[in-house]
Image (cartoon, rainbow, N blue to C red):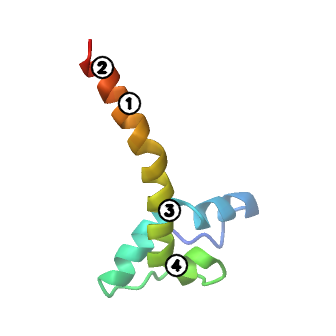
Amino acid sequence: MFVPIDGMPAPLRVFAGWNPISAVSSACRDLFGNPNPFATGASLPAQHPVLMAIAWSIPLVAIFAPLAVRRFVKTSSR
């Protein structure tokens, strides 16, 4: 997360907390030894950003890799 989510409206706060980009950026901060100064620790992604980054990556790749392969095969066969 690049901005504190505490001042956001409730629906936007939930979306920002569970956003895959927020999980990846928080995981990178943690892995490089620079913990997120804006993390409140109230949600699962804020408590375990590395786990959530991996958990978001698996379904995104599982959904979009076959779609990309199918599109590639379709366009390259023309």
Q: CA distance from mark 1 to mark 4?
A: 40 Å
The residue under label 4 is: 38
Amino acid on which the number 1 mark rests in the picture: Arg
Marks 2 and 4 close (CB-CB < 8 Å): no
Marks 1 and 4 close (CB-CB < 8 Å): no
Residue 48: % across, % down: 52, 81
The answer to which of marks 2 and 3 sits earlier in the sequence is 3
Q: Is disc 2 placed on a helix, strand or loop? A: helix
Residue at the top extreme of this rendering: 78
The residue under label 2 is: 75
Q: CA distance from mark 3 to mark 4?
A: 21 Å
Q: Tell me what residue is drawn at x 37 percent, y 36 percent.
A: 68
Marks 3 and 4 close (CB-CB < 8 Å): no
The answer to which of marks 2 and 4 sits earlier in the sequence is 4
Q: Is residue 17 left or right of residue 69?
A: right
Q: CA distance from mark 2 to mark 3?
A: 28 Å
Q: Quadrant of the C terminus?
A: top left
Q: Mark 3 vs mark 4: give the one in front.
A: 3
Residue 52: % across, % down: 51, 71
The residue under label 1 is: 70
